[in-house]
Image: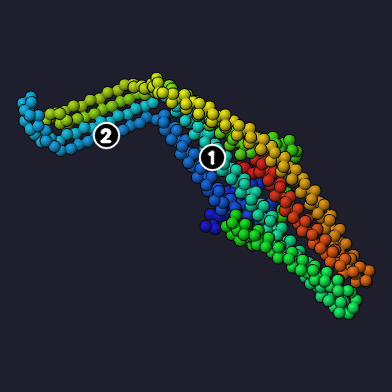
């Protein structure tokens, strides 16, 4: 099992390494494990195999067919003395073998092959889309585990500091240095810190459970968040790339081709069918005792249904409606992909700005907390000011950590929409 997983990881890496991307080994391993574990990929691969089988079946329609049938029995034949034959025991035998090769089917076979080809392409694109979604999910799970762990660590630090502030406030209250309100505020902030720590722990547990579900194993020790992958340089280029490579859009477009082949197949139902055949038969004791008959024939046979009550016309109308629906879905898919790329592009740049602002805010809040603590020690600031500064610093650190994870996921999501994660 471990050897197979290593092989799957190595096989998956060439499809994941983007130009300019700087991946940590741990993130690479997480993606490979998710790809090896995902049931959605197994389902999509089964769809590819089924589509290939349908294509083989469509090609088989143009191949010759060979069949043989026969029967043998034991009985008694009594012609009542007709032709002078008396009743006798007989062993009736009838064998027939035949072969037929389609010569012309009015386009039915070609249309079926085109439909099967389109279905195979759609199945392959569905597999690519599943790989892309699984990859983004793995990146999101990886980032969430690291984010949750860092935020939990920060809340543990805050909880410890608030506990110390509460202890000192109680001592100062006993000494008559601060009023009851300051002690109560310290206790309230400590309770707030405990609640924040509990929430952070819950988030970390949920994140690790999701990671386990995606990869099939516990998160363990993870490397820090890696650098962002290379992304399209402009929004227009991202949209153009998505038009060329997005697997969801490509599926919708190939579905139009399949629908067109369906229209051709429906129209072919009104055309004749012609095939060459060869048949041979052997008959024994079918009519008279010692009766024998052997035959062989070759030729051409055809069938043309000139009237079927409107069945062919109904199939054509149904296929035309299916084509219209496929074209509408393709247009909708293109518009949806455009909108999603714009959202992802905007989201990435928003999170980038949030990361920069978050770091600036965290640095300023840390400096404010340090200054407030010094001022409180010399009596220039009350205990409540320290508590407020502690709350602000914790919130600023958490927001900065959160933004870093969101930025990484947004970059991978943009590449997934642009089709940059497919092999």
Residue 244 visible in the shown view: no
154 lies above or below 110: below
Say whether residue 9 is left or right of residue 312: right
Say whether residue 18 is left or right of residue 61: right
What residue do we see at 87% from left, 66% from top?
A: 385
Instruction: Please give the count of numbered marks on the rendered protein.
Output: 2
What residue do we see at 24% from left, 34% from top?
A: 70
The image quadrant where one finds the C terminus is top right
Residue 89 location, x and y as percent?
10, 36
Q: Decide which of 94, 9 is in the foreground and name it.
A: 94
Quarter location, residue 301: top left
What residue do we see at 57% from left, 31% from top?
A: 325
What residue do we see at 76% from left, 57% from top?
A: 401
Q: Residues within 10 Å of mark 2 (few under 14, many from 20)?
A: few
The residue wearing badge 1 is 123
Q: Give the numbered dot on residue 238.
A: none
Residue 239 location, x and y as percent?
70, 36
The secondary element bearing badge 2 is classed as strand
352 lies above or below 168: above
195 lies above or below 415: below
The residue wearing badge 2 is 69
Residue 62 location, x and y as percent?
41, 29
Do the residues under discs 2 and 1 have CB atoms within 8 angstroms? no
Quarter location, residue 175: bottom right
Quarter location, residue 334: top right
332 lies above or below 362: above
Q: Decide which of 62, 349 is in the foreground and name it.
A: 349
Residue 350 location, x and y as percent?
77, 46
The secondary element bearing badge 1 is classed as helix
Instruction: Pick out the residue farthest to the top.
Output: 306
Residue 212 visible in the shown view: yes
């Amino acid at each position: 099992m471990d050897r197979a997983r290593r092989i799957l990881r190595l096989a998956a890496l060439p499809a994941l390494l983007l130009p300019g991307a700087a991946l940590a080994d741990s993130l690479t391993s997480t993606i490979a494990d998710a790809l090896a574990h995902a049931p959605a990929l197994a389902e999509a691969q089964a769809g590819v195999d089924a589509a290939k089988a349908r294509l083989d079946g469509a090609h088989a329609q143009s191949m010759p067919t060979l069949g043989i049938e026969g029967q043998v029995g034991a009985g008694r034949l009594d012609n009542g003395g007709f032709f002078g034959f008396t009743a006798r025991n007989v062993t009736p035998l009838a064998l027939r073998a035949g072969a037929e090769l389609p010569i012309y089917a009015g386009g039915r076979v070609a249309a079926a092959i085109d439909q099967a080809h389109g279905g195979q392409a759609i199945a392959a694109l569905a597999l690519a889309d599943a790989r892309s979604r699984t990859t983004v999910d793995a990146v999101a799970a990886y980032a969430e585990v690291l984010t949750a762990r860092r935020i939990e660590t920060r809340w543990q630090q805050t909880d410890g500091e608030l506990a110390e502030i509460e202890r000192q406030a109680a001592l100062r209250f006993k000494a008559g240095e601060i009023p009851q309100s300051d002690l109560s505020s310290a206790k309230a902030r400590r309770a707030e810190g405990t609640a924040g720590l509990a929430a952070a722990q819950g988030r970390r547990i949920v994140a690790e459970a999701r990671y386990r579900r995606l990869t099939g194993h516990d998160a363990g020790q993870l490397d820090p968040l890696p650098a962002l992958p290379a992304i399209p340089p402009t929004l227009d280029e991202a949209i153009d790339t998505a038009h060329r490579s997005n697997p969801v859009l490509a599926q919708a477009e190939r579905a139009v081709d399949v629908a067109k082949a369906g229209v051709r197949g429906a129209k072919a139902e009104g055309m004749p069918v012609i095939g060459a055949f060869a048949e041979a038969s052997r008959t024994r004791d079918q009519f008279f005792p010692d009766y024998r008959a052997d035959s062989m024939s070759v030729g051409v046979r055809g069938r043309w249904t000139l009237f079927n009550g409107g069945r062919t016309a109904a199939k054509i109308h149904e296929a035309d409606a299916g084509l219209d629906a496929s074209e509408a879905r393709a247009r909708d898919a293109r518009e949806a992909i455009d909108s999603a790329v714009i959202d992802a592009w905007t989201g990435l740049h928003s999170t980038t700005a949030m990361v920069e602002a978050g770091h600036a805010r965290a640095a300023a809040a840390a400096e404010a907390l340090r200054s407030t603590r010094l001022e409180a020690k010399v009596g220039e600031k009350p205990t409540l000011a320290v508590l407020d500064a502690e709350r602000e610093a914790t919130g600023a650190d958490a927001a900065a950590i959160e933004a870093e994870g969101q930025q990484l996921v947004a970059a991978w999501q943009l590449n997934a929409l642009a089709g940059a994660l497919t092999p």
